[in-house]
Image (cartoon, rainbow, N blue to C red):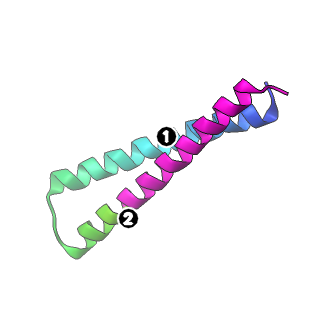
Amino acid sequence: MSIDQKLIEEGTAQLTSEIEVLEAWLRELEMLKGNDIETVAARKSYNDMLRSRREMLSSLDQQSTLQTASPE
């Protein structure tokens, strides 16, 4: 396994873990059903972070596919 592939796997595991945490936090906020400024801001922030992590995970998946398609 190349170093790049190892880094991709570690990054994928880290992002997957972060996505799970953010999804749990968003579920907790939904259960609170709060619409105060802090809750709305937290929900927006967590959704932005979640979107960003999913985009990074997608990029890593594409990179992993390229790595396995053309091994060095």
Q: Residue furthest right?
A: 72
Of helix, strand and loop, which mostly describes the magenta segment? helix
Question: How far across and down, in percent of the image, does residue 57 sit?
Answer: 54, 42
Give residue 36's quadrant in the image. Answer: bottom left
* Mark 2 → mark 1, Cα distance in angstroms: 17 Å
* Disc nearer the start of the sequence (2/1): 1
Q: Which residues are magenta?
A: 46-72
Circle 1 packing at 10 Å, graded few (<14), some (14-19), many (20+), is few
Q: Residue at x 66, y 33 (%)?
A: 64
Q: Which residue is mark 1?
A: 17
Residue 45, which numbered label?
A: 2
Mark toward the viewer: 2 or 1:
2
Q: Amino acid at mark 2?
A: Ser
Q: Is residue 47 magenta?
A: yes
Question: How far across and down, in percent of the image, does residue 16 sit?
Answer: 50, 39
**2 and 1 marks in contact (CB < 8 Å):** no
Quarter of the image where the C terminus is located: top right
Q: Nearer the viewer, residue 60 or 38?
A: 60
Q: Image check: 32 left or right of 70?
A: left
Element on which disc 2 rests: helix
